[in-house]
């Protein structure tokens, strides 16, 4: 409400310092209107009195001339350099008010942003400058703004409502103003490990540690500190797992652990082995032990092989013997025990030894290994190959071929090793004779027995069948030396 201020005699309305400009303009207009009426009445009264009594000049009335000089004609009402008029509502029309009055902030009262009470009207020129202050926080959508806190303003600019956020403003932080970076805030706060009061001294020491190594030094954890728990199998490398790790090449099994393979590269034989690697430096120094998948220790064969890698170079595989019986089986003296291996040419009952053709050396059949507990010899294509050096003795029969003789031939090197005995086989029931011989053999060389005759004899030249059971013709006995 404007403050009342009037003249002492006639009560004309006067402006007051704390009043709104618009209110005082209206008061002045009202005062001028009252003065106009009073002056008009005074003039009429003076005129009447002059007619009745006497006349005076304007100057005879104190202040009259000045009042007349300051009045404005009705034609000047509502015009430039004139005076404002009043509308039917008793107010000065907006067209006659200064434009500066429009858009000035005009407080409309408190506003409940949760219920939109009172309802915020659509922005329009008529409400330019209106503002409401949120008294209850809420999410009412006003021109896209939905985050209203107590104290926020909603202000109309005549085309839209704008939010003046009075709740998020921060004057300063730790003495910093304006745009504050994380680095500058950290420096201003100057937080140190000692400021962490809900941690123990040991905990603060770990936080202050320069690196992981320093933390481990502070913790000083040793193997003896691990007093319980079991490491899950999944955390172990495959080579240390529940079963051996499968490899394709024993040269690749260089880390500590257990392995297995069948027919892998760089194995001592083509068998299936379990293996163990014990490593000092993986690429330089280690030991490998291989064990046959199936052993025959009771017959003198554990199938245990070992080799070393020294300065990065693999050594050869060698056998490891598990007990005295195994050694005896492998190192029996010649003539003091049975052969280490026995090979024969065996044929079905009733099948003769084969045709003998004169004029050239022929390979005798050798197809059956009847004794070899240590796996020292293999047979292929009528040739035998020992894995170790030894001594062989052989014999081969002939019938009705006249003169005949055998020999031991080194297939690998293409040379004759030794000749057998010279024999003669006649034609008759007692005409079968055997050519025998003996010679040393080297490891990993292939050998065969060859036979030559003077007279050809089909089917039975290399042995006459009896038909009593398995027919046996050529034979080779092998001793390891």
Image: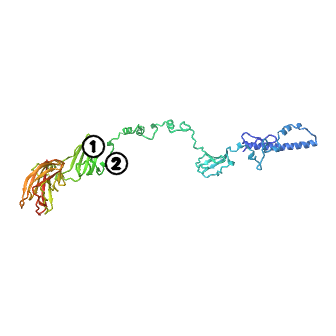
Side (left or right) of 96 relative to 45 = left
Foreground pick, 301 / 268: 268
| Rendered location of residue 212, percent (x, y) | 39, 39
Q: Quadrant of residue 473?
A: bottom left
Query: In this view of the protein, can residue 95 be seen by the observer?
Result: yes
Which residue is at 68% across, 48% downward? 127
Q: Earlier in the sequence, mark 1 or mark 2?
A: 2
Foreground pick, 235 / 282: 282
Q: Residue furthest front?
A: 359
Return the residue at label 1. Answer: 279
Q: Nearer the viewer, mark 1 or mark 2?
A: 1
Position of residue 349 relative to residue 151, above or below, is below
| Rendered location of residue 128, percent (x, y) | 67, 46
Side (left or right) of 285 relative to 102 = left
| Rendered location of residue 438, percent (x, y) | 11, 50
Could you tell me which secondary element the residue under label 2 belongs to?
helix
Foreground pick, 417 / 177: 417
Side (left or right) of 141 relative to 43 = left
Circle 2 Cα neighbour tier, 10 Å, few/some/many (<14 / 14–19 / ≥20): few
Q: Quadrant of residue 433?
A: bottom left
| Rendered location of residue 314, percent (x, y) | 25, 43
Q: CA distance from mark 1 to mark 2?
A: 21 Å
Return the residue at label 2. Answer: 235
């Amino acid at each position: 409400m404007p403050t009342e201020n009037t003249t002492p005699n006639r009560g004309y309305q006067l402006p007051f310092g704390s009043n709104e400009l618009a209110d005082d303009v209206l008061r002045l207009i009202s005062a001028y209107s009252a003065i106009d009426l009073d002056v008009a009445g005074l003039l009429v009264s003076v005129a009447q009195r002059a007619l009745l009594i006497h006349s005076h000049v304007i100057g005879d009335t104190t202040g009259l001339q000045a009042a007349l000089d300051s009045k404005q004609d009705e034609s000047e009402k509502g015009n430039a350099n004139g005076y404002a008029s009043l509308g039917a509502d008793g107010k000065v029309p907006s067209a006659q008010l200064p434009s500066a009055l429009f858009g000035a902030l005009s407080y409309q009262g408190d506003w409940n942003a949760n219920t939109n009470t009172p309802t915020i009207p659509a922005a329009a020129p008529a409400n330019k400058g209106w503002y409401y202050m949120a008294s209850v926080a809420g999410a009412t959508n006003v021109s896209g703004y939905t985050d209203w806190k107590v104290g926020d303003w909603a202000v109309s600019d005549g085309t839209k409502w704008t939010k003046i956020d009075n709740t998020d403003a921060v004057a300063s932080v730790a003495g910093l103003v304006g745009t504050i970076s994380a680095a500058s805030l950290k420096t201003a706060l100057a937080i140190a490990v000692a400021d962490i009061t809900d941690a123990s001294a040991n905990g603060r020491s770990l936080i202050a540690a320069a690196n992981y190594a320093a933390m481990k030094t502070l913790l000083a954890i040793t193997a003896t500190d691990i007093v319980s728990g079991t490491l899950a199998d999944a955390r172990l490398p495959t080579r240390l797992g529940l079963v051996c790790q499968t490899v394709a090449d024993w040269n690749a099994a260089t880390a500590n652990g257990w392995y297995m393979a069948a027919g892998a590269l760089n194995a001592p034989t083509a068998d299936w082995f379990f293996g163990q690697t014990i490593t000092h430096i993986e690429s330089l120094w280690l030991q490998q032990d291989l064990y046959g998948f199936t052993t025959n220790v009771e017959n003198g064969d554990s199938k245990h092989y070992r080799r070393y890698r020294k300065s990065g170079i693999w050594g050869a595989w060698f056998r490891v013997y598990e007990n005295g019986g195994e050694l005896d089986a492998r190192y029996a003296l010649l003539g003091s025990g049975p052969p280490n291996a026995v090979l024969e040419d065996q044929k079905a009952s009733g099948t003769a030894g084969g045709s003998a053709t004169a004029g050239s050396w022929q390979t005798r059949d050798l197809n059956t290994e009847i004794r070899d507990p240590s796996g020292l010899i293999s047979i292929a294509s009528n040739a035998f190959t020992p894995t170790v050096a030894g001594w062989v003795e052989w014999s081969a029969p002939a019938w009705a071929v006249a003169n005949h003789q055998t020999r031991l031939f080194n297939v690998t090197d293409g040379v004759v090793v030794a000749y057998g005995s010279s024999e003669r086989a006649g034609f008759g029931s007692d005409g079968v004779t055997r050519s025998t011989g003996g010679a040393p053999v080297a490891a990993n060389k292939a050998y065969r027995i060859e036979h030559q005759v003077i007279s050809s004899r089909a089917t039975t030249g290399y042995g006459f069948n009896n038909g009593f059971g398995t027919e046996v013709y050529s034979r080779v006995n092998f001793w390891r030396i």
